[in-house]
Image (tube, rainbow, N blue to C red):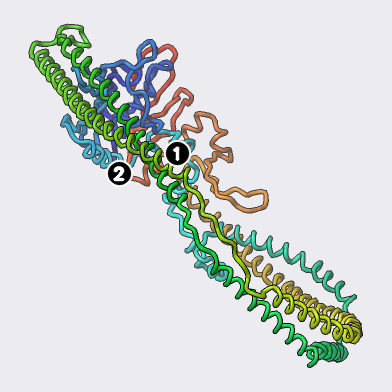
Amino acid sequence: MKTVKIIRMDIENFKGIRKFTLNLGGKSASIYGDNATGKTSIYDALTWLLFGKDSHGNSKFDIKPLNDEGNTIVGVMPTVSAELVVNGVPVVLKKILREKWEKHRGGEERYGGNTVDYYINDVPTKERQYKLQIESLVASEDVFRVLTNTYRFCRDTNWKERREVLFDIAGIESDADILAEPGFDGLREELGGRSIDDFRSMLVMQRKDANTKLNLLPARIDECERQLSGLPEFFDRTERDQIVCKIENLREKIVGLDSDEGRQRIKNEINAVILDQTKLDMENEQHRRSQSIPVQDERPMLCEKIQSLKDGIAASQRVISNAEMTIMRCTESIEEARKQWKRLNKQKFQPGVCHACGQPLPADRNAAMQKAFEQDIKDRKQALEEQSKRDKTTAAESEKAKQEAEKKLSEDNMNVNALQAQLSEWRVPEQEAIEDLPEYRETRAGLESKLNELRSQLMKLDADKDSVRRQLQDQIEELTRKKAVQDRLEAQFLQRRDVENRIEDLVGQQRTKAEYIDHIDDLLEQCEAFVQVKVARVSDAVNAQFTLCTWRLFTEAINGNLQDCCDALVDGVPYSALNSAMQINVGLDVIQTISDYYGLRVPLFVDNAESITRLNHLDTQVVRLVVSEQDKEMRVEQ
């Protein structure tokens, strides 16, 4: 068992404590003081010394003391040191918070944050080495806070974290160990790596879904059976096939009407006349094109040249405008640089004074500052001269570009005027009259007359066959109506077979769903049996570790399921409903058990100790923080 005790603590400029020494000599003690006298700050100082945080675990808090206006006092160095004894070996730890001040141009000093100095046995050390030393003394920060604060575990720790710690202390067997026992064979095989709670929730959801679907099946079966009442039980395709055969025969007769020889001969002659007309028209068109003399229109070319020159004019105007703006900007920049150079030339060095006391700075420091000042003036003047040279070069280049653009602009304007005059004088040459082929119109009229005669012969022949075709089509329409009746009867018969197959499928689903629900119910019973075994064993194992309190590790929900929790009880009363004295003693009971588990005894701070008349015995150093209205300054009693 490792034992850590406080021999002495020295606190200076820490929160509300300007200077305080706590001499304990490794013994327990009571610290009396009115509210806001700094009792809790002693515990904060210890946790900051060890972990860089206050007693609530905050790494950012007001470490430095405040003045009467509520502002942080500048220039103080919060310092905390503690002389500890660890298994009889003394160890001295110390931390100092220092302000960082940085020098800026002109010699001005500015606040740049804080830094922390670390000491072990009065020897300066690095932060990493300091933290390793703390870990070797008090294990982890979480364990230390639990063992030094009676409220930490039962009130401030998340119930899931409390539950994990209690299970570790009690050595709770795993779910896999319980599942390996007889009676859980089916459950063990179906878990598939899931926890019992997740698996049970999944089963409940699956059973609800399956039961919902099972309850819907009877109604769906009844609906299908009602559909059967209006559907035929038998259908013969013979009559329908005979109707289809008759329709095909009639359609073949109609096709035969269109394949008559005399009619086909007339159609061939009509096609020949149309071909002669097309050939004659093509020859005449070719003859007319041969008489056309192409004339080249020069206007598009002239317009293109004019537009190209106008684009060049616009580009030259942009170059001239940009050059003028650049020249103006460079001129203004040169003038501004000249004014800045004159202002710099007039500046004189002024000796500095201390910001803290207002006294003149030492001569050597003033000399260094004057040298830096003169070098800065020289550098800035040189930079202005170089910038002016660059501006003059840029202005000269822009002036040259402007002159070249103005010259090109004048030339392009002259060329545009010349081309526009040439465009206005251009005229399209006159085209001579174009004539058709000799006797083209007479030949074309003869072919058109012959074509009309042939079409009249074809129409007369078709008029005789239309009567026969109408009779055949009337017969086809009548047979088609009969076929539609047969098709509807066949569709109803096929629908009946589909409905019967659907009923058979739904009955099978009904049987399968019922068997599936029975299987789920069996697995749920195994889950309940598992939970009952686990609850009994876990509760007995955990509560056996404590003398005053017991732990409620499971609660029953409205639906009867057990839910995880972790609440301390005393005679059935929850921790949150206990009075302050009992809460403190419960905290002592917990600290005793956890301290034995980790093999570590550290100083315990009992806040609000005035609320309890008798503390349960705890084999460790105890520091009681007692509110005492008459003690306006802290008082220590052992």
**Residue at x 82% of width, y 72% of height:** 224
Identified at 38% across, 30% down, the residue is 55
Residue 270 position (above or below residue 387): below
Residue 251: mark in rendering: none
Is 300 drawn above or below residue 94 in the view shown? below
**Quadrant of residue 6 within the rendered picture:** top left
Q: How many marks?
A: 2
The type of residue carrying mark 1 is Phe
Q: Earlier in the sequence, mark 2 or mark 1?
A: 2
Pick the residue in front: 124 or 624: 124
Is disc 1 placed on a helix, strand or loop?
A: helix
Residue at 37%, 46% in the rendered image? 597
The answer to whether 497 is drawn above or below residue 522 in the figure is below
Inspect this view and state whether residue 232 appears.
no
Question: Which residue is situated farthest in the bottom direction here?
Answer: 261
The answer to whether any part of residue 319 appears in the image is yes
10 Å crowding of disc 2: few (<14), some (14-19), many (20+)? few
Which residue is identified by label 1? 153
The answer to whether 527 is drawn above or below residue 486 in the figure is above
The residue under label 2 is: 1
Label 2 sits on what residue type? Met
- The spot of residue 17 in percent (x, y) is 33, 18
**For discs 2 and 1, the disc positioned in front in the rendered view:** 1
Q: Quadrant of residue 277?
A: bottom right
Determine whether, in the image, residue 283 is placed left or right of residue 581: right
In which image quadrant can residue 237 be found? bottom right
Percent position of residue 88, x then y: 22, 36
Q: Estimate the spatial distance between the alpha carbons at disc 2 and disc 1, rounded to whole Å.
A: 21 Å
